[in-house]
Image (cartoon, rainbow, N blue to C red):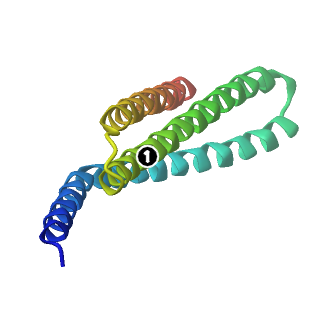
Amino acid sequence: MDAGFFVDSQSHISDISNVIRLAVAPVFLLTAIATMINSMNTRLGRIIDRRRVMQERIKNSSAPQMDELKDEMKTLIHRSRLIYMAILFAVLAALLVCVVVAGAFVGALISVDLAKYVAVSFVLAMSSMIVSLSMFLREVYLGVSSGVNLKR
C-alpha cells in the first residue's frame, strides 16, 4: 500500500476528531435551547388555559365586568402571540445551531472551507436566540404586571 494513503487517512481522522471536539459546545447549546423551548411551551399552555377560563367568564358575565374581562383577554392574546414568537425564534436558533454542526462536519469530510458559512450561521443562531429571549422577557413582564393590576 501507498504510504501517502496512511498519512492522508490519519490527517482526515484528526480533522474529524477536531470537528467532534468543536461540535460539543453547540450540542450543549442545543440542550439549553431545548430547555428554554420547554419552559416557553409550558407558559404558552398556561396562557391558553387562562384564555379558556376568561372566555367562559365573558360568556357568563354582566355588563359592568365586561370591559375588565375583555382587557384581560386582550392581554392574554398579546402574551400568547409573544410567547409563540419566542418559541419560533428559539426553534430557528436550534435549527441554525444544527446547521453549524452539520457545516463543520461537511467541511471536514469533503475538505471544503465552510468557516464563513458556519460563522454566519452561528451569528444568526445567536441573533435569533437574543430575539427569542427578548420576547420571552417581554411576555414575563406582561404576565407579572397584568397579575399585579388585577389584584388592585
Q: In the rendered view, does 49 fall on the left or right side of 136? A: right
Characterize the local packing of mark 1: few (<14), some (14-19) or many (20 or more) Cα atoms within 10 angstroms: some
Residue drawn at the location 58% of the way across and 30% of the way down: 82
Residue drawn at the location 42% of the way across and 50% of the way down: 98
- Residue type pointed to by label 1: Val
Q: In the rendered view, does 62 fall on the left or right side of 102? A: right
| Residue at the limit of the structure toward the bottom, as seen here | 1
Q: How many marks?
A: 1
The N terminus appears in which quarter of the rendering? bottom left
Residue 33: percent from left, percent from top:
39, 47
Q: In the rendered view, does 103 fall on the left or right side of 64? A: left
Instruction: Work out whether residue 103 or residue 34 is closer to the camera in this orientation and state it.
Output: 103
Callout 1 secondary element = helix
| Above-or-below relation of 122 to 149 | below
Instruction: Work out whether residue 107 or residue 138 is closer to the camera in this orientation and state it.
Output: 107
Residue position marked by numbered label 1 in the rendering: 99
| Above-or-below relation of 136 to 68 | below
| Above-or-below relation of 66 to 115 | above
Residue 6: percent from left, percent from top:
15, 71
Q: Quadrant of residue 109?
A: bottom left
Residue 115: percent from left, percent from top:
30, 37
Q: In which quarter of the image is residue 96?
A: top left
Residue drawn at the location 70% of the way across and 25% of the way down: 74
Residue 143: percent from left, percent from top:
51, 32
